[in-house]
Image (spheres, rainbow, N blue to C red):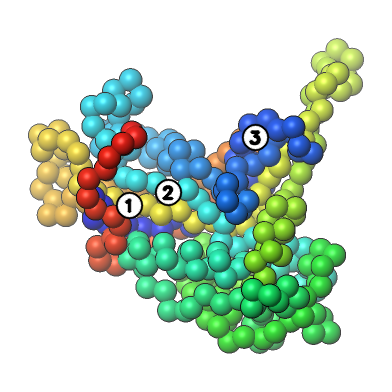
Amino acid sequence: MFDRAAILFLYTETPLHAGSGTSLGIVDLPIQRERTTGYPMIQASGLKGCLRDVAAGDTQKVEIVFGPETQRASDHAGALSVGDARVLLFPVRSLAGVFAWVTSQNVLARFKREAEMAGLQVNWEPIGPAPTDDGTAFVANGSGVVANGRVVLEEFAFTAQENNTVADIAKWFQDKAMPQGDEYTYWRESLEKRLVILPENAFRDFVQLSTEVIARVRIDDTKKTVERGALWTEEHLPSETLLYATLFASKPRVKDDELPDDWKQANDRVEKILEFVREAVDGKRLQLGGDATVGRGIVKVRFVEGQGQAQATSGTQTGGQP
């Protein structure tokens, strides 16, 4: 079904609000979350729409890669499958070092599974404190977020345990996942000192309770005061969050005479699909989610293509819509 794959890494430079609609909870406009884990996410439909907008310009190639417009959606499917964007590293306020990037064994294990499915080589094993140990956090040797043997995040303290694998994971993220470019040298180099692998429950609590909640108001133009009922709160993923999404590509689903001339002659037409997306987004800054007019949702993108054939599923799909 899919022949080639890649991973798209998204690094938030400003708070990002991928909304899930209104809520009766504490926050009026919460962000999208996974049903089972409660982890923040960006649904694939929103990410695909953003990629399509960025790639706009060559209508013929856009329709081959992403599919025709809604009115002609039944003509053929697109050649690119975009997955949900999942959280990989989440920034949390730290007593030492200002903030730490936290993750967990579950998150690392799932990322490794999907990265290898996309053809990336991952040379580390996911690690984390024992399931019954809620008081320990794994850090690299010489971590910058440890004070007196403790990692203090928000108002919670963990016993710091140094582990060599944390440095291996940080090194892999520095090379493969963090944005490239000189402006990111400091952030890449500080990752090893800030990386903390938390117990599962603690990680879940931080990604649920340590997001940014911003109050918004609408001013009455005449009175210059807040309009009645025009005060609401929005939840955002904080700046410095790292997410990832899988991209799977298949052969173009159109007849040969409907292909652009440079793709007709290509020996590897699937590679042309990924090449088109890579040239459109790799190293670029995109705007995702709402509140674009107040500077929200700016993400730096890194496109990493897998080596060899994707290990994605093949076979016949039954039921549902393609």
Check disc 2 and give the amino acid type: Gly
- The answer to whether the residues at label 3 and label 1 have Cβ atoms under 8 Å apart is no
Q: Which residue is mark 2?
A: 83
Residue 188 pos. (x, y %): 58, 70
Q: Secondary structure at mark 3?
A: loop
Quarter of the picture containing the C terminus is top left
Q: Earlier in the sequence, mark 3 or mark 1?
A: 1
Residue 80's disc is none
Check disc 1 and give the amino acid type: Phe
Q: Earlier in the sequence, mark 2 or mark 1?
A: 2
Q: Which residue is mark 1?
A: 248
Measured in 3D between alpha carbons, the distance from the residue under mark 2 to the one under mark 1, in whole angstroms, is 8 Å
Judged left or right of residue 36, residue 249 is left
* Residue 33 seen in this snapshot: yes
Residue 259 pos. (x, y %): 16, 37
Q: Is residue 145 above or below residue 314?
A: below
Measured in 3D between alpha carbons, the distance from the residue under mark 2 to the one under mark 3, in whole angstroms, is 23 Å
Q: Residue at x 71, y 65 (%)?
A: 202
Residue 291's disc is 3
Q: Earlier in the sequence, mark 2 or mark 3?
A: 2
Q: Secondary structure at mark 1?
A: strand
| Mark 2 crowdedness (10 Å alpha carbons): few <14, some 14-19, many ≥20 | some
Measured in 3D between alpha carbons, the distance from the residue under mark 3 to the one under mark 1, in whole angstroms, is 29 Å
